[in-house]
């Protein structure tokens, strides 16, 4: 129906029938003003009219026994094929029918039946008026549902788009103003401190003052307007009719239309009222604000509140995500710095031990240079005397010859040439041994610290342990006894350089736990399809609470500045990448045993470059 007060009645077969005067009375009845009667020659023409017009409220059909089948088909087409359920069908029965009125209503969807024997204009008009009211109720309900659907659809669209809060509020304000017939609307913001002020979000209907919205923003919403503060405080929709006539009069002058009242819609997020949407109604517009419309607006406000809550939650989540992202970046930087400190500390400790081992042979090599210099001086003097002596013999200078012979004899007795030659050979041999020791240390260090390729390669774990101990054992040779039992192990595909790092960390931790004095037993063996490397020390052991966290990153029991807690954590990661595990048994006063368990099949996967870099 295009308008609430206009409709069309389709009359079928009325001319010449007993019902002709009843149909003619429609247009002359004041109570039915606005109705238009359109005549159709038969039911087929009536269907065409129904398809052509959208304002048909009722069909009044004069039906005799001969037209009964055609009428039944008409009703079936109208109700089931055209899905038209609101148009009222009134059957004016002529003659005798084989069907009762109830059969017509139930089977064919006829709304009322009037018999020709009761053909009275007043009765007909009363029956028609009743059906028209039902039709209009249906139309109003349909319109209300359409409005509700449109509003909820708009809210659903808000949830699927990236509209900001202001855009959502503006669209919501516009939507409820349109469905309620409001001529002016505004969003009143409720601050966290309780202050109430108008926002820049306004709606102005067509035909109102061009600057009405701008002027409304300048009006303080609180004086003489307890409805605003009450809506903000209680959070419920409120309709105001005559709360402040002066306010409506003054505002009506701004709008250019007389105002009769307003209603307020509070919007809440997490139990707090964020804002209040205030819609101003024109004179005569209050009747549009029905109970059903209020229910729709309240439901829509609740839905928008949910969207605002979600938006606020997403905003908080984004802020927390950014903070967490920054914290993770700081943590990553801190870990990298601590990792570097751990590596530098390990390198420093290792370098100190290696320097000590190299200094010993270098020291006695250097100490041999002093006697060698003296021996060279003596031998140089003897060679000089010998050269002069040969020259004197060649020149037959007997006096010079006797003098030089005496000098040679004296020098020979002074330097003991036999001893010098023997000692020189010993010094050279000792120096050679010392330099070979330095060479061995460098070779062992290079073998221990070599950077593996990313692909695993078969390696002898026993040899890896030997090279590791050659590096670290000399640092504790005066206090720690190393007892090694190497089993018969096959070569295992692995990254030996990284496993050497694991062995070094465990050995150093054991020696430090024993304060550099005790016994460390190391043995290797094959157990089923695994290789087990055991490290057993005589240290003080660990309580259960320490043992549970020994592989946690940054966990350390060492004093501040002496450890970062990354050594065993990195070692644990290396062994896990090899498909193995590190086990630990320890108790206070019973020492500690670490077991590195690796699969005989080894690791074939390409190693993570980050892991190689972490321990390089």
Image: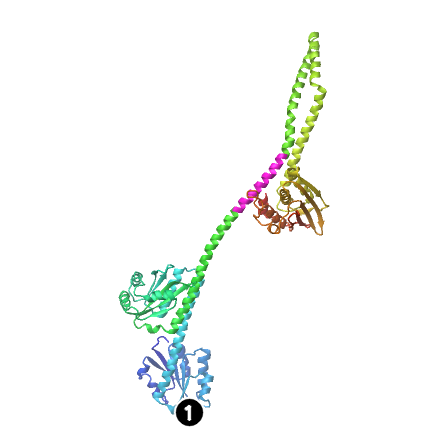
The C terminus: image quadrant: top right
Which residue is located at x 49 percent, y 52 percent? Answer: 325
Direction from residue 558 to residue 268 in the image, left or right? left
**Residue 148 in the image: x percent, y percent?**
41, 70
Does residue 460 appear in the picture of this structure? no
Residue 173 is situated, as x and y percent measured from the top left of the image, at: 37, 65
Q: Residue placed at 61% from the left, 39% from the top?
A: 350
Dominant secondary structure of the residues highlighted in magenta in the image? helix
Relative side of 316 to 221, left or right: right
Q: Please say whether residue 114 is one of the residues in the magenta stretch.
A: no
Q: Residue at x 46, y 81 (%)?
A: 76
Looking at the picture, does residue 497 appear above or below residue 125?
above
Q: On the image, which quarter does residue 92 sit in?
A: bottom left
Query: Residue 210 location, x and y as percent?
Result: 29, 63
Is 530 positioned to the left or the right of 224 in the image? Answer: right
Residues in magenta? 334-356
Residue at image mark 1 = 95
């Amino acid at each position: 129906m295009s308008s609430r007060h206009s409709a069309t009645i389709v009359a079928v077969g009325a001319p010449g029938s007993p019902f002709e005067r009843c149909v003619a009375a429609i247009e002359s009845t004041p109570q039915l003003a606005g109705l238009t009667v359109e005549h159709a020659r038969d039911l087929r023409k009536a269907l065409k009219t129904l398809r052509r017009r959208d304002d048909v409220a009722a069909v009044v059909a004069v039906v005799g026994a001969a037209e009964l089948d055609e009428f039944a088909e008409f009703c079936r087409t109208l109700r089931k094929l055209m899905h038209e359920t609101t148009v009222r069908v009134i059957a004016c029965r002529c003659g005798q029918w084989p069907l009762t009125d109830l059969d017509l209503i139930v089977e064919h969807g006829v709304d009322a039946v009037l018999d020709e024997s009761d053909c009275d204009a007043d009765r007909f008009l009363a029956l028609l008026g009743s059906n028209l009211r039902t039709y209009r109720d249906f139309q109003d309900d349909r319109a209300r549902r359409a409005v509700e659907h449109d509003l909820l659809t708009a809210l659903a669209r808000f949830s699927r788009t990236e509209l900001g809060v202001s855009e959502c509020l503006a669209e919501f304000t516009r939507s409820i103003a349109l469905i309620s017939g409001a001529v002016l609307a505004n969003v009143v913001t409720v601050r966290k401190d309780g202050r109430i002020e108008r926002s820049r979000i306004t709606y102005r209907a067509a035909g109102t003052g061009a600057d009405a919205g701008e002027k409304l923003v300048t009006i303080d919403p609180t004086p003489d307007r307890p409805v605003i503060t009450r809506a903000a405080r209680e959070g419920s929709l409120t309709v105001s009719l005559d709360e402040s006539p002066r306010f409506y009069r003054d505002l009506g002058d701004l709008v250019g239309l007389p105002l009769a009242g307003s209603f307020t819609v509070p919007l809440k997020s997490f139990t707090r009222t964020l804002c209040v949407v205030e819609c101003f109604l024109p004179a005569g517009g209050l009747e549009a604000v029905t109970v059903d419309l209020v229910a729709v607006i309240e439901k829509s406000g609740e839905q928008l509140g949910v969207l605002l809550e979600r938006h606020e939650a997403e905003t908080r989540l984004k802020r927390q995500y950014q903070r967490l992202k920054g914290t993770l970046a700081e943590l990553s930087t801190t870990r990298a710095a601590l990792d570097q400190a751990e590596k530098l500390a390990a390198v420093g400790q290792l370098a100190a031990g290696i320097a000590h081992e190299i200094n010993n042979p270098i020291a006695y090599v250097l100490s041999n240079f002093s006697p060698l210099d003296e021996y060279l001086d003596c031998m140089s003097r003897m060679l000089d005397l010998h050269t002069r002596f040969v020259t004197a013999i060649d020149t037959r200078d007997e006096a010079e010859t006797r003098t030089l012979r005496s000098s040679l004899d004296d020098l020979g007795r002074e330097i003991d040439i036999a001893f010098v030659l023997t000692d020189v050979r010993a010094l050279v041999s000792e120096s050679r041994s010392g330099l070979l020791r330095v060479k061995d240390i460098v070779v062992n260090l290079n073998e221990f610290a070599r950077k593996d390729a990313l692909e695993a390669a078969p390696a002898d774990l026993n040899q890896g342990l030997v090279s590791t101990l050659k590096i670290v054992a000399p640092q504790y040779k005066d206090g720690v006894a190393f007892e090694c039992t190497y089993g018969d192990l096959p070569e295992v595909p692995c990254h030996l350089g990284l496993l050497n790092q694991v062995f070094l960390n465990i050995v150093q931790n054991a020696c430090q736990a024993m304060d550099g004095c005790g016994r460390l037993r190391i043995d290797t063996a094959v157990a089923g399809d695994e290789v087990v490397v055991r490290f057993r020390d005589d240290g003080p052991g660990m309580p259960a609470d320490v043992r549970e966290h020994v592989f946690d990153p940054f966990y350390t029991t060492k004093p501040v500045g002496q450890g970062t807690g990354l050594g065993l954590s990195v070692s644990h990661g290396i062994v896990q990448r090899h498909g193995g595990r590190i086990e630990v048994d320890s108790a206070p006063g019973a020492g500690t045993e670490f077991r590195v368990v690796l699969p005989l099949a080894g690791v074939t996967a390409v190693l993570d470059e980050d892991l190689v870099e972490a321990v390089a």
